[in-house]
């Protein structure tokens, strides 16, 4: 089982926003949705668009390049042109810190 790694502080990610963070060498898209945090891979599986620069609506993030949509809770594709999911991460909040690990 992988270790939890601190990736941000709570004040770094305000409600309704996305932010790119690093988990070891991996680029991760972190979201604050209704005060709860979710993390999935940041690199779109279509052509590598940066999901953290896309739009967040409910639990869906839309890739800024060609509008594929992914579920922030699972990394699953909700809308093409992407076909493969991005990885999902487990999130833990400890005082002011946000930690994640790969599921
Ligand atoms: S790179 Fe994300 S939809 Fe094309």
Image (cartoon, grey):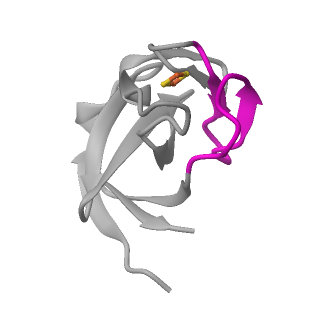
Image point 55% across, 29% down: which residue? Answer: 33
What x and y, as percent, mark residue 3? Answer: 38, 79
- From the viewer's perspective, is residue 36 above or below residue 19? below
| Res 90 visible | yes
| Residue at the limit of the structure toward the front, as seen here | 47
**Relative depth, front residue between 36 and 7:** 7
| Residue at the limit of the structure toward the bottom, as seen here | 1
Magenta region, residue range: 67-86
Please name the predominant secondary structure of the magenta segment in the image: loop
- From the viewer's perspective, is residue 90 above or below residue 54? below
| Res 96 visible | no
Q: How many marks?
A: 0
What x and y, as percent, mark residue 14? Answer: 35, 24
What x and y, as percent, mark residue 85? Answer: 65, 46
> In this image, 49 relative to 67: left or right?
left
Task: Please tell me whether residue 34 belongs to the stretch shown in magenta.
Answer: no
> In this image, 16 relative to 60: left or right?
left
Image point 51% across, 20% down: which residue? Answer: 63
Image point 65% across, 23% down: which residue? Answer: 69
Give residue 48's quadrant in the image: top left
Give residue 23's quadrant in the image: bottom left
- From the viewer's perspective, is residue 21 above or below residue 50? below
| Residue at the limit of the structure toward the right, as seen here | 78
**Relative depth, front residue between 74 and 44:** 44
What x and y, as percent, mark residue 19? Answer: 32, 31
Give residue 46's quadrant in the image: top right
Task: Please tell me whether residue 79 belongs to the stretch shown in magenta.
Answer: yes
Image point 25% across, 65% down: which residue? Answer: 24
- From the viewer's perspective, is residue 51 above or below residue 64? below
Q: Quadrant of the C terminus?
A: bottom right
């Amino acid at each position: 089982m992988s270790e939890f790694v601190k990736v941000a502080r709570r004040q770094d990610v305000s409600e309704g926003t996305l932010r790119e963070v690093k988990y070891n060498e991996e680029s991760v898209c972190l979201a604050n949705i209704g005060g709860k945090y979710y993390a999935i891979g940041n690199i779109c599986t279509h052509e590598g668009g940066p999901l953290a620069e896309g739009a967040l609506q409910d639990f869906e993030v839309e890739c800024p390049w060609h509008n594929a949509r992914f579920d922030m809770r699972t990394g699953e594709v909700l809308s093409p042109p992407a076909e493969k999911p991005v990885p999902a991460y487990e999130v833990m909040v400890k005082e002011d810190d946000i930690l994640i690990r790969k599921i």
